[in-house]
Amino acid sequence: MSKMDRNVHSVKALRTIGCDEFEYGLLPVLRHIMIGLSESDPRGWARGQDIAVERWGEAIGLPVAHLLNRVALALFDSRDGGPEMIDPLCIETREHMTDDEMQIMSMLHHMRRDKASGARSAVAFVTRGRMDPDLIRAGLGFAHRFPAGVKLASRKLGKPKLSVVA
């Protein structure tokens, strides 16, 4: 049994910390972004962005992907080699999570609900004991833009002021 086998949870374990449907949707986006940052899949960022846009539309999906990218960059900077992530393209392991993924999701979950204690514990876990200010800032930036309990709806953008005339 490998280290990975011992530390794998079902994605359904996110229910134990009370994750909502929005948070469930973040995991595959974050995985693709993280894989892209690790250079094992240079198209990871684009896939993550595409998944976010497919799931929430451009008005919400693009800012989700952008702010998750900030979280991912801070995660890589706070820990040599970055956190352990499951390959989002592997069908066999897609429904599982590493300890790191569980704690990252817990961090975002608690930050979106302004629960400092739970967020601190999760940050300490993924950074191996450091309260990294860049990761905290990135997580809180995401939480501020997408707080829990606020209905996600595309903003009415109105009719464009410019148009193509043939």
Image (spheres, rainbow, N blue to C red):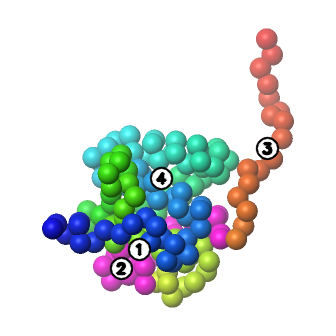
Q: Secondary structure at mark 3?
A: loop
Residue matched to label 1: 103
Looking at the rendered image, the disc whose residue lies closer to the viewer, 3 or 2, is 2
Drawn side of residue 51 relative to residue 113, left or right? left
Q: Which residue is mark 2?
A: 125
User: For residue 142, which numbered disc appears in the image?
Assistant: none
Camera-nearest residue between 104 and 165: 104
Residue 140 in view in this figure: no
Q: Is residue 143 above or below residue 156?
A: below
Name the N-terminal-most of marks 1 and 4: 4
Residue type, mark 3 in image? Leu
When asked about the image quadrant of residue 19, the answer is: bottom right
Residues at marks 3 and 2, CA–CA distance in whole angstroms:
40 Å
Please, what is the three-letter code of the amino acid marked with disc 4?
A: Val
Residue 25 magenta-highlighted = no
- Residue at 73% x, 62% y: name it: 151
Mark 3 against mark 4, which lies toward the viewer? 4
Q: Are marks 1 and 2 in contact (CB under 8 Å)?
A: yes
Q: Along the horizontal axis of the image, is 75 left or right of 145?
A: left
Label 2 SS: helix
| Rendered residue at 34%/75% (across/down) | 127
Residues rendered magenta in the picture:
121-148
Name the spot of residue 158 as percent of width and height, x first.
83, 41
Q: Which residue is mark 4?
A: 29
Q: Kindly check if marks 2 and 4 are in contact, taking CB atoms under 8 A apart as contact.
A: no
The residue singled out by tag 3 in the image is 157
